[in-house]
Every structure is written in C-alpha cells, then in structure tokens.
C-alpha cells in the first residue's frame, strides 16, 4: 500500500475514533425548525410590519450593535438563542420564514415578534387590545410549517424520517398572551385563569408537529416577565410587598411560575403519549433569576440589573414607553454584555448565550439538548 494512502486511512480512522469517543457529533441535527415570538425572531416581524406600514423600530441601530454590526430584525444587540444553537450544530443562522428563502433544507424560523399562543381574533373580538394584531399566533405558525413541509419532505412512504435529525422548538409562547391580559387590567386571578388554555395550545402545536414527523422538540417555558424594565414601569406600585428580593413583581411572576409548572407537567404527559419522540422542557425562568440574584458572578453590573441597556429615563429601570430603543436619539449603554435587559423587553446577547448554553448542555433543560441528540 502506498504510504500516502496509508496516512490518509490512518487519519480517517483517527477522526472516526475520536468522533465516537466524544460520544456525540455536534452535527447530529441537520436542520432546525423554530416557532416562537420576539425572543427568537430572526427577522419575521419587520417583514409583517412592513406589509401594514407599522413602524418596526427594530430595523434601526443600535439593534445588532454587538454581533451583526447592523439591525437584522432580531430584538437584541446580537444573537438570539436559536443563533447560538445553530452555531453549535454547525448550521447557518435560520432565515426568517417570511423572507421566502430559496434554501430551507437546513431549517427556517417561523417565530415572529408579538406572537401569542391563543389565536389573535380572541383578543380582538373580546376587545382585550386597543389595536389590530398581526396574525402570527402559534396555530398560524404551525400552518406556515405545514405549507413549507412539502418542499422539505415529500409525503411518501418513510417521509416521517425526513425530520428525524431536525430540532424543533415551540416557544417561548405565553408572554404576549399574559401581557395583553395584564394590559387590559385583568386581575392576577383572571390572568391566571387563562394559563390552561395557553398551555393547551402549546401542547396541541407540539402534537401537530410530532404527527408531521418531528422527533426532537424543545418546549421553553416563560421567562420572569415581572423582572422586565417595561413591566416594572407600567405596573409600578408604592406597595413594597408587591416586590420580591431582587425587585421583581411577585404577581406577574406568580402567573409565570404557574404557567411553567403546568407546561412542564403537560410536557411530561406528551412524553408518555409519544415515547418515540424526545420532548425537552427548557427552563427560561431559573437562569434569569440566577443572573439577577448574583450579577457579579455573570459579569453583570450589579447596579443595572433591572435597567434597560438601550432606553431612556434613567432611574432604576431606564425605560420610557414613549421613547424606547430604536427611536431617534435613544442610545445604548456602552457595554450591553453587562446588562440583563437589552431594550426593556428583550434580553442581551450575553443573556441569550448563557440561556442557550444552559439548554444545550447544562441544567436548564430536561434533558439537555446535547444529551438528547445522542439517544
Ligand atoms: C414571500 O412570498 C409571498 C407569496 O408569494 C409574497 O406574498 C411575499 O411578499 C413574499 N415575501 C417577501 C419578503 O418577499
Ligand atoms: C389568520 O390566518 C389564518 C391562517 O391563514 C386564518 O385562518 C385566520 O382566519 C386569520 N385570522 C385573522 C384574524 O385574520
Ligand atoms: C416533492 O415532490 C415534488 C413534486 O414531485 C417536487 O417538486 C419537490 O421538489 C419534491 N420535494 C422534495 C424535498 O423532494
Ligand atoms: C426515524 O423516525 C422513525 C419514525 O418515528 C423511527 O421509526 C426511526 O427509528 C427513526 N430513525 C432514526 C435513525 O432515528
Ligand atoms: C387600565 O387602568 C388604567 C389605570 O386605571 C387606565 O388608565 C387604562 O385606561 C385601563 N386600561 C384598560 C384597557 O381598561
Ligand atoms: C417619557 O418620554 C416622553 C417623551 O420624550 C417625555 O415627555 C416624558 O416626560 C417621559 N416620561 C418620563 C416618566 O420620564
Ligand atoms: C458543554 O460542556 C462541556 C464540558 O463541561 C464543555 O466542554 C462544552 O464547551 C460545553 N458546550 C456548550 C455548548 O456549552
């Protein structure tokens, strides 16, 4: 045998062996299909907003200042959670589904800012919102996936296998639903009473995707909305007992905790119903609290933990509902990675990175995504 060939073979063997011994290949997932709202939107919101001449402030600097160097439609200074996951799997950043990308074989992102779990006509018919909503709720996003499905996978024999190596994500959903109920001046008990129907819609979407061939589905819970600068300003109260040890609103987070508990339990039920699928509950709540409780450990500014990096007004929250990030003259803090909140509503890239690491590898997902993909 020629020496050159021998070397080549040895090299192949070595890479093969090391691939096996590490227990996983980072390239297991060959595509990602994600549904959700602004926390993971990679550009759908500006496309929908443009169609109805609604201003999309996210199109302006300083959005994108940390990573892309320009606004990309992400409600962040840089990458969102699904971007870090795509990087981990060696996939391209997911194109927003509404951009009609010609190549969707490695995945697409259906998430849109403002998306609800409950269909939008419910909020409009019941006069819960004083404006027209974009029609982008969870069931609509599942419909977009089903419309796109034939271009990825033909419904022939064995077509279920098409998505065996795809990672699906359904969420987070619920943040916008509950926000609309709070804004309509519902009481805590009233907002709480909608939790079962929000969770049920998430579960139904997961089932529809599994029936369409999804075999790995991540279902994130809700982050602590009661710690957001925007919510802390709009629901400000002199009642000290309304705030917890880090300064978050107990009532708002109480509903979030109820949602997360019921969602986690419902995911358990889905695992029993679909044993061939891996359904992962991802905790979006604990990692944020960990950072708020111990900011220095995470390289965060202890004095700015409830402040928006990009916003106006100063004070404890740096948030003003009429002059926010993306509007002319609204500046970002010099170092977004020292902040939890980017724009008063969404997290900084630094937080998104920590959360995605926790979901991939750590203790914030059951089971961690990188472990699930070895199964
Ligand atoms: C995507 O395609 C749809 C249907 O053909 C069209 O209505 C829409 O304008 C396209 N969107 C973009 C951003 O080009
Ligand atoms: C939203 O879109 C879905 C799917 O296209 C449609 O069935 C529904 O009627 C629309 N709802 C509203 C309020 O426009
Ligand atoms: C599925 O079949 C249609 C019609 O035969 C074809 O146009 C399309 O390219 C196929 N899609 C895939 C992913 O093979
Ligand atoms: C792919 O999915 C099908 C149907 O769920 C299952 O029977 C099959 O074992 C899976 N194959 C792999 C390689 O995971
Ligand atoms: C909610 O209450 C506030 C303060 O009382 C009031 O200004 C606002 O108009 C109310 N909103 C709705 C939708 O009823
Ligand atoms: C919020 O901004 C508006 C417009 O710049 C300003 O008129 C208002 O006083 C600000 N509100 C607070 C509470 O600072
Ligand atoms: C996962 O954990 C391992 C070992 O602790 C570490 O080497 C690796 O970088 C981590 N990966 C991610 C994506 O966090």
Image (cartoon, grey):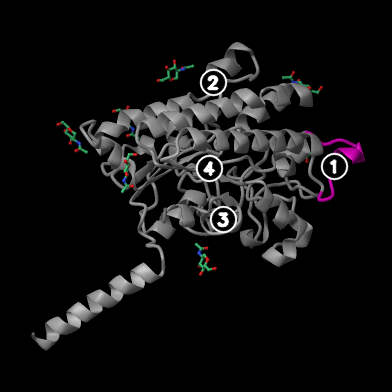
| Rendered position, 130 above or below 354 | above
At numbered mark 3, what does the secondary structure look like: helix, strand or loop? Answer: helix
At numbered mark 2, what does the secondary structure look like: helix, strand or loop? Answer: helix
At numbered mark 1, what does the secondary structure look like: helix, strand or loop? Answer: loop
Query: Can the viewer see residue 185?
Result: no
Q: Residue at x 63, y 12 (%)?
A: 126
Dot label at residue 305 = none
Say if mark 2 contacts mark 1, CB within 8 Å: no
Report the front residue among 168 and 368: 368
Residue depth check, mark 4 versus mark 3: number of the one nearer the observer:
3
Task: Determine whether the beta carbon of the residue marked 2 sits less than 8 angstroms from the nearest atom of ligand 2.
Answer: yes
Q: Could you tell me which quadrant the N terminus lies in?
A: bottom left
Magenta extent: 235-246
Q: Main secondary structure of the magenta part?
A: loop
In the image, taking residue 118 as reference, residue 207 lies left or right, namely: left
In the image, taking residue 145 as reference, residue 235 lies left or right, namely: right
Which residue carries the number 1 mark? 243
Say if mark 2 contacts mark 4, CB within 8 Å: no
Crowdedness near tag 4: few (<14), some (14–19) or many (≥20) residues, C-alpha within 10 Å: many
Residue depth check, mark 1 versus mark 3: number of the one nearer the observer:
1
Say if mark 4 contacts mark 3, CB within 8 Å: no
- Tell me which numbered mark, 1 or 3, is placed earlier along the sequence: 1
Q: Residue at x 41, y 56 (%)?
A: 374
Report the front residue among 272 and 118: 272
Crowdedness near tag 1: few (<14), some (14–19) or many (≥20) residues, C-alpha within 10 Å: some
Dot label at residue 58 = 4
Say if mark 2 contacts mark 3, CB within 8 Å: no
Which residue carries the number 3 mark? 349
- Marks 2 and 4, how far apart in space? 22 Å
């Amino acid at each position: 045998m020629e020496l050159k060939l021998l070397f080549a073979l040895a090299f192949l063997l070595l890479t093969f062996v090391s691939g096996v011994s590490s227990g996983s290949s980072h390239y297991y997932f060959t595509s990602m299909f994600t549904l959700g709202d602004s926390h993971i939107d990679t550009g759908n919101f500006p496309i929908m907003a443009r169609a109805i001449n609604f201003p999309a402030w996210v199109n302006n600097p300083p959005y994108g200042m940390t990573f892309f160097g320009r606004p990309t439609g992400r409600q962040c200074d840089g990458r969102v959670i699904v971007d870090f996951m795509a990087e981990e799997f060696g996939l391209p950043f997911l194109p927003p589904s509404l951009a009609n990308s010609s190549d969707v074989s490695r995945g697409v992102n259906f998430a849109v800012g403002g998306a609800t779990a409950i269909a939008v006509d419910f909020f409009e018919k019941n006069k819960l919102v004083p404006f027209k909503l974009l029609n982008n709720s969870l069931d609509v996003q599942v419909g977009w996936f089903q419309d796109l499905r034939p271009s990825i996978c033909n419904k022939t024999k064995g077509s279920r296998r098409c998505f065996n190596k795809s990672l699906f994500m359904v969420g987070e959903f619920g943040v916008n639903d509950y926000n609309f109920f709070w804004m309509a001046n519902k009481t805590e008990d009233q907002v709480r009473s909608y939790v079962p129907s929000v969770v049920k819609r998430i579960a139904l979407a997961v089932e529809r995707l599994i029936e369409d061939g999804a075999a790995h589905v991540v279902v994130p819970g809700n982050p602590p909305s009661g710690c957001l600068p925007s919510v802390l300003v709009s629901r400000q109260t002199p009642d000290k007992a309304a705030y917890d040890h880090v300064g978050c609103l107990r009532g708002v987070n109480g509903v979030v905790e109820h949602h997360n508990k019921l969602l986690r339990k419902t995911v358990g039920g889905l695992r029993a119903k679909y044993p061939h699928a891996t359904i992962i509950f991802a905790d979006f709540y604990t990692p944020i609290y960990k950072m708020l409780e111990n900011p220095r450990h995470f390289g965060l500014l202890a004095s700015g933990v409830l402040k928006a990096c990009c916003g106006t007004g100063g004070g404890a929250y740096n948030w003003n509902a009429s002059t926010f990030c993306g509007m002319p003259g609204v500046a970002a803090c010099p170092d977004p990675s020292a902040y939890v909140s980017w724009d008063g509503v969404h997290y900084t890239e630094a937080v998104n990175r920590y959360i995605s690491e926790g979901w991939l590898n750590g203790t914030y997902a059951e089971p961690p995504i990188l472990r699930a993909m070895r199964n």
